[in-house]
Image: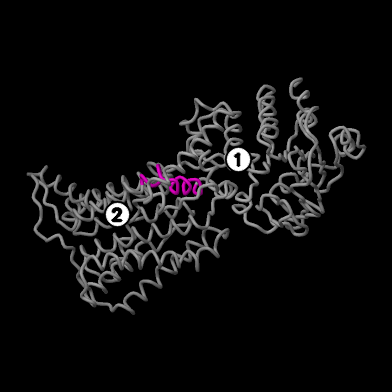
């Protein structure tokens, strides 16, 4: 029975891990295209969850309206954020943008409950709640949905960056902003696009994550998972976000299944960080990250 | 370089001034990079900018292509003031450039690099290219053909799908030239296109530059250190030293100019 328990933990870890990948993708796209480190990624997800809860619980509108509102709301929000706050910071030291996003995170955590109320609201996906039993696996429909959404997006983003003209241009912007400008590429437009993509990812992540945990300010804590994911995978790699997400999801679940009973709980939350610190020492640019070689 | 010399001698006379730089200056902190430099680039000609290291050649190029905004003076393309335009706008107006240190998008293939050069010529937007499959597809094919033509011109056929990071130095320089050509520029700014090349590679590059100029009718502004090449292929030469223009004229005039001889041979105060 022991191996079945392990498989169960791993299976659920994979599903949750894909959700982490999806949310980390928002972070990676922004970092790749604009070099900005977004410490408010978790709050983006929270905001999207609040939007969808407002639509479904307060206005009692159907699920698909909530998804549309969350996506449109997050895209407008991230466009506006890029235009009003981040663009003026272009060319300033990286730390300026980091501080701005940390500030933004605090503001969102405060404003969210202020506007939408502090109570936990439950939203549900139209997928039922009967768990799916497959051999040793017991999978929750919400988690399966989340994993499928994540896979679809990861595939879509991969196609976008490898094949589409805008995706290739965005990689060019990420590679060398100056040269991209000399090619006539409007760099600022691609910055805005990258933030909008982070908005879309957060919107879908927020709806699913909110459905899993219930919607309140704690949804933003998922942002804390983003850092081990992107450090393990590589800050600028989409494949890395997937692999990093899977590692974090699995490690977290194994820690919850095997370590928590021994130590009385809590190891689930820090195990990914232990891994992250080891990764930083061994491979600071991540498993798939680009190793930066700089002329001194 | 017998061949290139022969070609240079029968070049047509350069026409009017296509690009005019008037009294531009640029300071960085207290350091004067460029001081009150003027020059006129004849339509259809090759103008070379020469000068010792630190003379302000690249800074001048950066002001033309919009990367630096001049503190004083103006830059005009075909009569239109472009002094304060963004680099991406200037590229769209038809001024393409290459960089001193090779600046290819290293994770991308040769073809992708060239296709990015066509970015400003692409009309169909994202949604069009996603929805209106037909027209957007035709446009894509037209751009692809334009790139293939450049690939053939620069003899890069075998390297289309190679990542540029894996290419030899001289080839990367050639791809960078190709990417700039993909913009279909009116004016091509080349920042040391032969820097670090051996003699054979230099000769190839000089040949390509002449072909670009004569067959494609592209005006060329060239920064180059190799005096032999410069004197061979240029219609006009402008000499900078410590941020100032010290001479200008035909290659023959410049070679005889005492100020130039002094700057290259006599000036010991330069770092």
The residue drawn where x is 87% and y is 42% is B247
- Stretch in magenta: A158-174
Distance Cα–Cα, label 2 vs label 1:
41 Å
Q: Foreground: B160 or B125?
A: B125
Res. A283 image quadrant? top left
User: Does residue A106 appear left or right of residue B69 in this picture?
Assistant: left
Residue extending farthest to the right is B258
Q: Foreground: A278 or B191?
A: B191
Count of numbered marks:
2
The residue drawn where x is 50% and y is 57% is A189
Q: Which residue is mark 1?
A: B180
Q: Check if mark 2 and mark 1 are on a common chain.
A: no
SS label for mark 1: helix
User: Does residue B13 appear left or right of residue A67 in this picture?
Assistant: right
- In reply to whether residue A170 is colored magenta, the answer given is yes
Res. A106 image quadrant? bottom left
Instruction: For mark 1, name the chain.
Output: B
**Res. A20 mark:** 2
Q: Does residue B107 appear in the picture of this structure?
A: no
SS label for mark 2: helix
How far from the left and from the top, in percent, is residue A63? 21, 67
Residue extending farthest to the top is B2
Q: Does residue A272 appear in the picture of this structure?
A: yes
In the rendered image of this protein, does residue A68 appear above or below residue B111?
A: below
Quadrant containing the C terminus of chain B in the rendered view: top right
User: Does residue A285 appear left or right of residue A220 in this picture?
Assistant: right
- In reply to whether residue B106 is colored magenta, the answer given is no
């Amino acid at each position: 029975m022991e191996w079945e328990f392990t498989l169960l933990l791993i299976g659920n870890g994979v599903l949750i891990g894909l959700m982490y990948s999806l949310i980390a993708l928002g972070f990676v796209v922004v970092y790749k295209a604009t070099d900005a480190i977004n410490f408010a990624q978790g709050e983006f997800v929270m905001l999207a969850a609040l939007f969808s809860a407002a639509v479904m619980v307060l206005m009692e509108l159907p699920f698909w309206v909530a998804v549309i509102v969350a996506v449109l709301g997050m895209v407008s929000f991230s466009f506006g954020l890029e235009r009003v706050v981040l663009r003026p910071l272009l060319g300033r030291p990286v730390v300026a943008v980091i501080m701005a996003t940390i500030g933004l995170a605090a503001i969102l955590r405060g404003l969210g409950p202020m506007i939408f109320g502090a109570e936990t609201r439950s939203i549900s996906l139209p997928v039922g709640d009967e768990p799916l039993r497959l051999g040793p696996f017991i999978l929750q429909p919400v988690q399966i949905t989340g994993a499928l959404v994540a896979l679809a997006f990861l595939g879509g983003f991969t196609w976008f960056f490898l094949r589409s003209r805008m995706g290739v241009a965005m990689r060019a912007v990420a590679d060398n902003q100056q040269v991209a400008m000399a090619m006539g590429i409007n760099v600022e437009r691609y910055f805005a696009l990258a933030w909008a993509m982070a908005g879309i990812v957060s919107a879908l992540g927020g709806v699913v994550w909110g459905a899993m945990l219930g919607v309140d300010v704690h949804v933003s804590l998922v942002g804390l998972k983003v850092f081990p994911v992107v450090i393990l995978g590589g800050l600028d790699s989409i494949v890395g976000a997937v692999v990093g997400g899977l590692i974090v999801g699995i490690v977290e679940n194994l820690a919850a299944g095997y370590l928590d009973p021994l130590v009385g709980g809590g190891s689930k939350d820090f195990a990914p960080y232990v891994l992250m610190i080891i990764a930083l020492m061994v491979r600071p640019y991540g498993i798939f990250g680009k190793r930066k070689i700089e002329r001194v | 370089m017998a061949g290139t010399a022969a070609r240079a001698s029968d070049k047509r006379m350069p026409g009017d001034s296509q690009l005019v730089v008037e009294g531009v200056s640029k300071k960085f902190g207290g350091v004067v990079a460029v001081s009150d430099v003027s020059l006129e680039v004849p339509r259809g000609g090759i103008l070379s900018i020469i000068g010792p290291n630190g003379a302000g050649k690249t800074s001048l190029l950066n002001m033309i292509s919009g990367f630096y905004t001049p503190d004083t003076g103006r830059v005009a393309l075909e009569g239109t003031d472009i002094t304060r335009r963004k680099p991406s706008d200037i590229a769209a107006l038809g001024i393409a450039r290459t960089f001193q240190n090779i600046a290819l998008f290293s994770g991308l293939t040769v073809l992708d690099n060239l296709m990015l050069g066509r970015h400003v010529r692409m009309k169909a937007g994202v949604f069009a290219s996603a929805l209106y499959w037909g027209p957007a597809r035709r446009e894509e094919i037209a751009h692809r053909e334009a790139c293939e033509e450049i690939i053939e011109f620069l003899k890069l056929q075998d390297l289309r799908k190679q990542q540029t990071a894996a290419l030899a130095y001289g080839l990367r320089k050639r791809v960078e030239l190709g990417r700039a050509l993909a913009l279909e520029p009116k004016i091509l700014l080349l920042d040391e296109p032969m820097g670090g090349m051996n003699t054979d590679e230099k000769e190839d590059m000089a040949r390509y530059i002449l072909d670009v100029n004569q067959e494609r009718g592209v005006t060329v502004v060239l920064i180059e250190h190799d005096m032999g090449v410069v004197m061979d292929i240029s219609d006009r030469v402008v000499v900078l030293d410590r941020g100032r223009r010290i001479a200008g004229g035909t290659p023959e005039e410049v070679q005889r100019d005492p100020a130039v001889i002094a700057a290259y041979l006599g000036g010991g105060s330069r770092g």
